[in-house]
Amino acid sequence: MDVHLEIPPAMPTKLELPMTKERRCPACQSEHVKRAGHFIAASGMIKSEHRCEGCGAAFWFARERIP
């Protein structure tokens, strides 16, 4: 009996998500994105986790901190 199990690729951790300064999905370029939760402020940047409504990709939307 030959058993072949396919292991799905691991989901990226929050820190490994792609980052963009444009409010659009870096995977499919859709502008239909929603805030998905976490915020990080460090090194003069504010990052918020977003998710694309079209393809489902998660990413960080980053902007510079206002002094």
Image (cartoon, grey):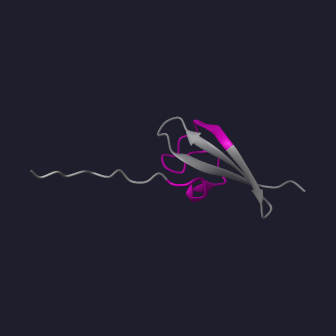
Give the residue displayed 72% in from the left and 48% down from the top: 39
The residue lying furthest to the right in this view is 67
Occupied quadrant, residue 20: bottom right
Residue 14 relative to residue 7: left or right? right
- Tell me: residue 41, above or below residue 36: below
Residue 12 image position (x, y, % from top left): 51, 54
Residue 6 image position (x, y, % from top left): 27, 51
Q: Nearer the viewer, residue 60 or 16?
A: 16
- The region drawn magenta spans 12-37
Q: Nearer the viewer, residue 62 or 10?
A: 10
Q: Nearer the viewer, residue 15 or 57?
A: 15
- Tell me: residue 58, above or below residue 54: below
Give the residue displayed 82% in from the left and 55% down from the top: 65
Residue 47 relative to residue 9: left or right? right
Magenta stretch: residue 21 in it?
Answer: yes
Residue 18 relative to residue 4: left or right? right
Residue 58 relative to residue 45: left or right? left
Residue 16 image position (x, y, % from top left): 56, 59
